[in-house]
Each structure stands twice: as structure tokens, then as C-alpha cells.
Amino acid sequence: MSILLNGAGVSKGIAIGEAYVYSREQNEISEHKVSKDQQKNEIQRFKKALTKASEQLHEIKQKIAADTPADILAFIDTHLLMLEDPAFNEGTISNIKEYSCNAEWGLQIQSNRFVQVFNEMEDPYLRTRKDDVLHVVRRIQNCLAENPEHVPDGAQLKGRIIIADDLTPADTLMLQHHKIAGFVTEFGGPLSHTAILSKNLGIPAIVGVHHARQLLRTGETLIVDGLHGMVISQPDKSSLKQYREIKKKALARTNLLNKLKNVPAITLDGAAITLHGNIDRPEDIRILKKYDDTGVGLYRTEMMFLEKNSFPNEEMQFKTYKRALFRLKGQLLTIRTMDLGADKELEETLEQGPMAHNPALGLRAIRRCLKEPDDFLPQLRAILRVAALGPVRMMIPMLTNVEEIQQVFNLIETAKLQLKQRKTRFDQNLQIGAMIEVPAAALSASAFARQLDFLSIGTNDLIQYTLALDRIDDEVSYLYNPLNPAVLQLISITINAGKEAGVPVSLCGEMASDPLYTRLLLGMGLDYFSVQANALLEIKHIINNSKLASLHTQVQKILKASSIHEIESLVEQLNH
């Protein structure tokens, strides 16, 4: 009899194959009091476990390094860096001494502290980083318990669908190396490193399928629908035929889109559209180039700060931005200055004050940079320097008024003066733009456009600020709708302000990556999209099969509508 299970689809595609239930022992962690003399022994046990955990990860890297890009291996490097982090290992040693406890319990205390910090973060991507802590802790606890790491033989895994409680990035890479067909996990979320890896590696995957290991058995035939988050166990002949046909059509669709790689984005009536990608780190450019040879419309630099959990100095930032620029080989790099705030905080600043009651409305992004210029100036100098080496422009997040723009200009002049005094080369004419992600900025877009070189609409924040809601709050998230008429009006105001001033306007929020809104945005006059890498070819396909003249007429009717239901119906017609 067939069983249907549901979870969160994190990597599109259909996998059909036999299940392999990947079970690992869970260690029961309990506290044991130890004497002062025994503390030294526990500390030594912990240090040996750290070394063993590091050796295991390096061994995995060696096994798969031959055919795995460096940016993919960087997910393992994240865990290796955690093993070397003083806040992690020295904190555990302090716990052993302070609480006179065994190494396992000292590690558990430190793990709980880290998890609590991540749980309090508003940003869903950063909150998911607690998974990395838990993965590293589990590996160390296994080493403390001297449990041998069991990895099934590659021949057992080839073509199988893996069923597990959770998978670490190292697990995922090793399993992909053994050519698995797909995987299903009981835990994990769509923003976890494992989910991101599965998408980058093209492995159909579903997470959050509760009790999957109890309900599914090794050897059973499974269908994994990564798009809809469905697992079908023991499918009948009709279902197998249906999904094999879907898989065949999906492959044909992929082949069709692949033909658009490096083809210009031009509408049917000859309008050239700029199509760039979004990145978090230089290594993401490899993934971008996999889809299209294009530039970067949004480089979120705060990820470097958060992953290192500190303020990188000017030289480190310069080298990182330079690496991104050189990987683009002459294409544009748009660097957004750090968007740090009360919900995306570095550990070294956590003790400086209480967490804001509403982090999204607090001291974040440019507000923080203007208040703490000593942290901001090294980034400005690094960007000015790298801009002398190729096409680079700088984008400022969360500006709300023209006075802030002038303050930013003053700091840029200070940075230039400092570089001149050091006789360091920089770009005197660096282009400066603003993220339009606050309603006040959208309503002042004309004034912004007169002072800046470009504008970029960040729809994620613009929508939640306009509608006064937290999009990750289950109680109100149903109100989060890009098609709200107020949101569309603010986007339209910004695009029109840019055209009147002769200033480019891009859109880099999630709306740009969603095919549902491509024709709507084209009809509103948007001619610059910055999207997630895996959306590039799909968006380009829609652009190349759209006629602007007819879209403008239909979109004017949409902009006059006052009901979301009516707008949704009109957008559906537009897409047909």
C-alpha cells in the first residue's frame, strides 16, 4: 500500500529509487561531577575529541576534493573553523572548570548558549545557523564517546534515496560523491546549509518529514518530489509512470533553459533587459557562472562579518572583494555595505547592550554604520580600493532620508582622504547607490535619484515595512503579499523616479527571482533584475518571450486596482 508523506521541498527535481535508512546512534548526554584533579583529564579528553573531529572532516575533504568545487567544500570549512573558534572550545574548557563537570556536559552547556543566541535572531537564514553548531557538537560528542563513524559502502548507496534524521554538509557531500538519487530528512529547514548544498548540487531533497525513519524501510521504492515536498512510498504502476513522465519533461525543460546560457535577455520587441545575480560570498560566483556569464547586482557583505563573527580589517575585506571582482572577469560587481543590526549581531558586540525590542526597526544597516564610523570606514576604504581594479559600485542599505545620504558622502570623502594620505590607489569616481527598502525612501525616490548614481529596490523589507508585519511570524505572515496595491505603488514610484532622473533602477528582492512577477515588473518599466543564481535562466526565458508594448497596457490596469484578489486575477491573465 502506498504512503504519502509531506515535508519542505528544498531542491527541485524528481528522484525515483530504493530507500536506504541511514541510522546513527544518538549519545545520551548527562552530567557527572568530577574532582579538581579529574578536570585536567576531562579537558584532555575534550581536546583529543576536537582533534579527532577535525581529522574526520579533513578525511572527508580528501575523499571528495578531486571532483568538488572549492566553494562547495567551504561548507565543511565552516565546521572546521568552528572547531578552532576560541568562543567554542575555550568556552567548553571554562565550563568544565567552573561546573566541575565531565567534558560532554561542558560541551552541552556551551552548545545551548550558542543555540540560544541564534534562536533570538530575527533573520531566518542566521537563525538556521544553529544547525551548524548542533552538527559540530554531535560530531565532537561522538568522538568523546569513541563511537566509530559509520559511512555505508558507496555501492550500497548509488542510486538510492537516503532517509535520515538530519544530514550535515559533510554527510551531504559524501553521499553526493556516492551518487545518491535524493534524500529525505526528518529535521532541518529550507535555509540550512544542507538544503542550500542539495540545491547547488542538484540533488532532489525534502526536509522536515517527521517520523520518516519509522515509516519508511530500506529497499522500498520511493518517489521524491522535491518541488512539492512529497514522498510516495511503494507507488503503484500509474504513479510511477506519471512521475517518470514528469521527470522526462523536467529534463527537457532544463535542456531548453540551458540553451539560454550566455544569450542576451531581450524582449520580443527588442528591449534589452539587464539580468544580474545575487551573492553572499565570492565563492557563490561559481554557481552564478554555472547558469549565466553575468554580473552581480547584490553582494551581501555582512555574511563575511557574521561567518567570521568579527569585523574583518580593511585588508581582509579588500582581498575578499578583489577575489569576487576577479572571478567575474570584467562583469559588474555591486557591493552592498554591511547590513548588521540587533538581529544580525556579532558575538563581540552582544554584551554592549540589550537586544532591541523590535530589531527590524532598530539600529541596523546604515544607521549603525553612521553611529559607529570606525567600523564603517575600513569597509569604505576597501571598496574604494577594489573599485580601482574593475567595474565596481557601492550600494547603501536602509537609507530613509537625504540627510543620511549626505552623511554617507562625508564619510566616503574621509575614507578617500585617508587613502590619499597613505598614497593608496582608489577609484575617485566610485558610483554610489541606495537600497529602496523603506516606504519613506520609496516616497522620496525622486530626491534620492537626484543625488545618487543608481537605485535598487529591496522588496523583502519594503513589503514587511509597508504592511507593518514580520513575514516570519506565523500569526501574521499570511498578510505578506507582494501584490498588495500599496507595495506595487511604491515600486512603481521608484521605477518612475529613476526614469525621470535618468538613473538606473534595479530590483534585487525575492520578487525579482519569482517567475510569477516577471511580466508584471517588466510592464511597470523595470529593466534591471538581480536574482538568485538558480532563477536566472527561468527569468530570462520569460523576458525573451514577452512583449513590452502589450505588457505596459495591461499593467496600468493592475496598478489602478485596489483589491488584492482582483490584482492576483489580472496577474494570472498577464502570465497566460
Image (tube, rainbow, N blue to C red):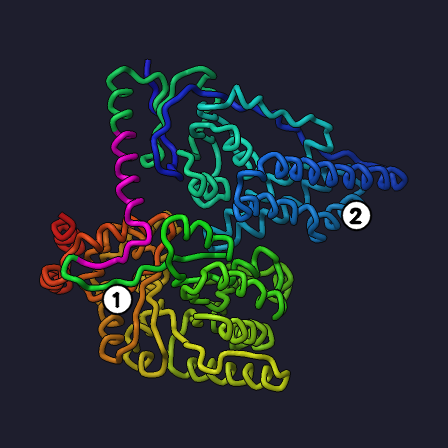
- State the image coordinates of residue 472 (x, y, percent, origin top left): 39, 51
Residue drawn at x 42%, y 41% as measured from the top left: 199
Say left or right for 138 vs 467: right
Q: Mark 2 sits on what residue? A: 98
Residue drawn at x 37%, y 28% as measured from the top left: 15
The residue tagged with tag 2: helix, strand or loop? helix
Which quarter of the rendering shows the N terminus? top left
In reply to whether residue 247 is colored magenta, the answer given is: yes
Q: Which residues are magenta?
A: 246-267
Q: Residues within 10 Å of mark 2 (few under 14, many from 20)?
A: few
Looking at this view, is 338 or 454 the one in front?
Answer: 454
Report the mark closest to the observer, 2 or 1.
1
In reply to whether residue 353 is colored magenta, the answer given is: no
Looking at this view, is 420 or 513 the one in front?
Answer: 420
- State the image coordinates of residue 23 (x, y, percent, origin top left): 56, 23
Looking at this view, is 369 or 38 the one in front?
Answer: 369
Name the residue type under label 2: Glu
Which callout, 2 or 1, points at the residue further toward the start of the chain?
Answer: 2
Q: Mark 1 sits on what residue? A: 491
Disc 2 to disc 1, how far (Cα)?
56 Å
